[in-house]
Image (spheres, rainbow, N blue to C red):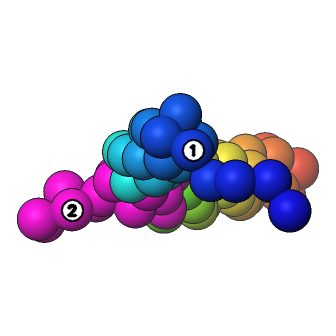
C-alpha cells in the first residue's frame, strides 16, 4: 500500500476546504439562504405570478364572452 505523504495531506486539505466553500455557497450559512434557497424562493414567486397571469387571462376571457353574448342577445 502506498504511503500517505505530506503532498497527499495538502491535497486532501485543499479538497476539504473547497468542499466546505461549495457547501456554504449552495446551502448558505448564518441566515443566508444560499443558491438552493434563492432557487426555491424564485420558483415560488414565478408560481405566484403564473397564477395571477392565468387569473387575468380567465377574467378577460369571461368578460369577452359576456360582452359577446350581450351583443348577440341585444
Left or right: 62, with 27 as reference point = right
Q: How many marks?
A: 2
Which range is magenta? 23-40
Q: Are marks 2 and 1 in contact (CB under 8 Å)?
A: no
Q: Residues within 10 Å of mark 2 (few under 14, many from 20)?
A: few
Give the camera-side residue of 36 and 65: 36
Percent x, y for residue 14? 44, 38
| Sequence-first disc among 2 and 1 | 1
Marker disc for residue 5: 1
- The answer to whether one can see residue 57 in this image is yes
Give the camera-side residue of 9 and 66: 9
Most frequent secondary structure within the magenta stretch:
helix
Quadrant in which the N terminus is drawn: bottom right
Left or right: 3, with 34 as reference point = right
From mark 2 to mark 1, how far is it between C-alphas? 33 Å
Give the camera-side residue of 1 and 35: 1
Q: Residue shown at 21%/62% (left/top)? A: 29
Task: Look at mark 2 in the image and give the residue it sits on.
Answer: 29
Q: Residue shown at 42%/47% (left/top)? A: 13
Percent x, y for residue 73? 84, 58
- The answer to whether one can see residue 41 in this image is no
Q: In the image, which is nearer the foreground, mark 2 or mark 1?
A: 1
Figure quadrant of residue 32: bottom left
Magenta-colored stretch includes residue 61: no
Q: Residue shown at 88%/50% (left/top)? A: 72
Asked if 19 appears above or below 31 in the picture, the reply is: above
Q: Residue shown at 81%/47% (left/top)? A: 68
Magenta-colored stretch includes residue 34: yes
Amino acid at each position: 500500500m502506498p504511503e500517505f505523504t505530506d503532498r497527499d495531506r495538502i491535497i486532501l486539505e485543499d479538497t476539504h476546504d473547497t468542499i466546505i466553500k461549495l457547501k456554504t455557497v449552495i446551502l448558505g450559512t448564518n441566515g443566508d439562504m444560499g443558491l438552493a434557497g434563492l432557487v426555491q424562493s424564485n420558483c415560488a414567486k414565478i408560481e405566484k405570478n403564473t397564477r395571477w397571469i392565468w387569473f387575468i387571462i380567465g377574467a378577460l376571457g369571461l368578460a369577452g364572452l359576456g360582452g359577446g353574448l350581450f351583443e348577440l342577445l341585444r
